[in-house]
Amino acid sequence: MTVPTTPPRGRPHLMGVLNVTPDSFSDGGRWLDTRAAVEHGLALVRDGADLVDVGGESTRPGATRPSAEEELDRVVPVIRALVAQGVTVSVDTMRAQVAAAAVEAGAAIVNDVSGGLADPRLAEVVAGTGATMVVQHWRAHGATMQSRDHLDYDDVVTDVVRELRQRVRELQAAGVREEQLVLDPGIGFSKHAEHNWTLLGRLPELHALGRPLLLGTSRKAFLGSLLAAPGADGSLVPRPPAERDTATAATSLLAAQAGVWGLRVHDVRASADALAVLHAWTARMPSAPSPEATEASA
Ligand code: PMM
């Protein structure tokens, strides 16, 4: 199943994050039990998620990888149960074996943060199943992604665009159709805060790649450092992940204005609210089509 390139209701797709992991940076361990994970997935949909992204491997800096079996055990039962309830599911995996089992269980999207680099066989799975694939900019696994050689850019936007273009070419050579691809600059993956802000400030250059864009800013460290405040000893302490949702919703609003296809967020409700405000506001601007026309075309 290919997911439409035109987002619903005239706003970006909201992709709710469901990490079935013990160690993700903001919600590790909370949804490790299958039943709790499925309930949380359904709650994300009630909050306004159009897609639920189920992941069994934490990609945070320094994370160690689970085995393929562990990853399968975590994600497949959750995907199957959510699909049975009519949810559009994406699987957040870098492994071909997991992608294949997830699509078999009903996932519509393969969200590979490595863009097909970590496991070259993943492209064959995507080509063979016709699933949508999110191709994220990536340079290395969590253990080394923030090492000095992986943070080396001449110009972060030009370099990310070039590396993503190369991925698209290689995936097409492996049989994936261009229409299957959604691209993602990989906020926080081999990037310092300044790199992340530069990418966000220059999104039109990423749009020039000609494919829909997904962004994952939710609760990430660059927001924590933006909102840092002095601690008891006077040194700056980053805002903790669970207190970054208002800032995340602000990025969602700005990214929607910049025309992205999708937003991957933990707190779906906050971003859905921000997008509702944006829609109500811009629909009444003199240059906008009437709100009724936008709704009719959605
Ligand atoms: N970020 C994380 C995990 N998966 N997928 C895409 N496409 N884009 C992202 O930015 C992204 C991702 C890391 O965040 P998490 O540990 O909170 O899931």
Image (cartoon, rainbow, N blue to C red):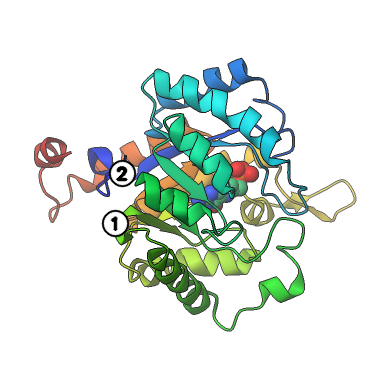
Q: Nearer the viewer, residue 174 or 142?
A: 174
Quadrant in which the N terminus is drawn? top left
Given residues 170 and 162, the one toward you in this image is: 170
- Residue 181 horizontal side relative to residue 138, left or right: left
Q: Residue furthest bottom?
A: 154
Q: Residue 291 versus residue 67: which sits nearer the camera?
A: 67
Q: Which amino acid, by three-letter code, is at mark 2?
A: Thr
SS state under label 1: helix
**Mark 1 crowd level (few <14, some 14–19, many ≥20, 10 Å Cα):** some
- Mark 2, residue position: 2
Of pointers 2 and 1, the one earlier in the residue sequence: 2
Q: Quadrant of residue 192?
A: bottom right
Quadrant holding the C terminus: top left
- How many residues crowd mark 2 within 10 Å: few (<14), some (14–19), many (20+)? some
How many numbered markers are drawn? 2
Label 1 C-beta lies within 8 Å of the nearest ligand 1 atom: no
Residue depicted at 27% across the width and 49% down the height? 5
Residue at 66% x, 49% y: name it: 59
Res. 154 visible in picture: yes
Q: Residue at x 84, y 56 (%)?
A: 235
User: Residue 292, position in %: x, y?
Assistant: 10, 36
Read off the residue under disc 1. Answer: 179
| Figure check: 16 above or below 36 | below
Inspect the image, locate mark 1, and give the three-letter code of the amino acid beneath it.
Glu
Residue 21 is left or right of residue 115, and the answer is right
Quadrant of the image occupied by residue 189:
bottom right
- Side (left or right) of 18 relative to 1: right
CB atoms at circles 2 and 1 under 8 Å apart? Answer: yes
Give residue 241's position: percent from left, percent from top: 67, 41
